[in-house]
Image (spheres, helix red, strand yellow):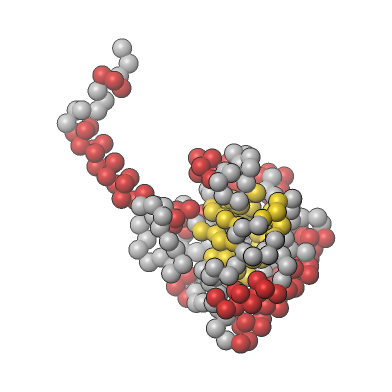
Amino acid sequence: MKKIKILNKTFTKPISCLTAYSPSIAKILDGKIDLILVGDSLGSTLYGMKNTQGVTMDMMKNHGNAVNREIKRSLKVLDMPYKAYDNKIDAYRNAKTLLNHCAPDLLKIEISEKKLVVLKHLVDKKINVISHIGVTPQSYKDFNKIRVLGRTNKEKRDLLKLAKQSETLGAKAVLLECITADTAKLITENISIPTIGIGASRYCDGQVLVFDDLINLTTNNKKPKFVKNYFNFNKIASNAVKKYNQEVKLKKYPSAKFTYN
């Protein structure tokens, strides 16, 4: 693997990244994970939204501030929400708001050809940006319509071009979402900044997952192919709730040990 750098941190092994939306999760991840992302995926994960288009600046400010003040060792990444960077003027104003309120190390924006001018403007203003290409969830009202990209030669060329343009304009890394393995490999081998994948194969320089998917916190049975559960929190928590309910019904809880005298 190539020697890669993000800001003042150098990585000789693949970069790990997970999402966090609360201080308690941030404390668990800090120092154990290279990058911690306050993602707009909080829309569906926490608020039950069908997509990320309903996520607001206030949501990102509140969760970003709560999470980032607990992070001491990992790099802090924050998503800019839908419609917050439609043009370079709004993008810079909203970016400054998030930076001042949440103090992330990097902001992440979803990039298309039309958004390259926004990327350039933010970089010119000395803001650290991660360029998110491939499947860009903010573009979808219906996540069921998302499909893997990079299967055609045109898609491969377009994605490689977008990644190269992102690097040229000063992005600190490129996040690749839901693209084929050979396309991810092609991009990773042809740019010098890190690639971080989600559903984009082991050929990326790093990987990101939603923490709630990692521990199987959600009850959604229709998960993307790339999601791997490392711990079944849902099952363990359900058993704990059943035990608590039983002890309350039998008046075993609270016992003397948990009672003030």
- Residue 212 placement (x, y as % from top left): 45, 53
- Residue drawn at x 55%, y 46% as measured from the top left: 32
| Total number of numbered discs in the rendering | 0
Q: Is residue 254 above or below residue 41?
A: above
Q: Quadrant of the N terminus?
A: bottom right
Q: Out of 250 and 159, give the one closest to the viewer.
A: 159
Which residue is at 53% across, 48% downward? 21
**On screen, residue 182 above or below 8:** below
Q: Is residue 87 left or right of residue 71?
A: right
Residue 80 image-quadrant placement: bottom right
Residue 168 visible from this viewpoint: yes
Horizontal arrangement in the rendering, residue 120 relative to residue 177 (left or right): right
Please tell me which residue is depicted at 26% across the width and 36% down the height of the picture.
244
Residue at 48% x, 53% y is 211
The percent position of residue 123, horizontal first and vertical second, equals 79, 60
Along the viewing direction, whichever of 155 and 4 lies nearer the viewer: 4
Q: Residue furthest right?
A: 124
Q: Where residue 117 appears, x then y in whole percent?
A: 77, 69
Task: Give the quadrant of the C terminus.
Answer: top left
Along the line of sight, the residue nearer the viewer: 7 or 135: 7
Q: Residue furthest bottom?
A: 153
Find residue 98 and report its horizontal and vertical position in percent: 68, 49
Left or right placement of residue 145 versus residue 71 in this view: left
Compared with 255, 197 (above or below) is below
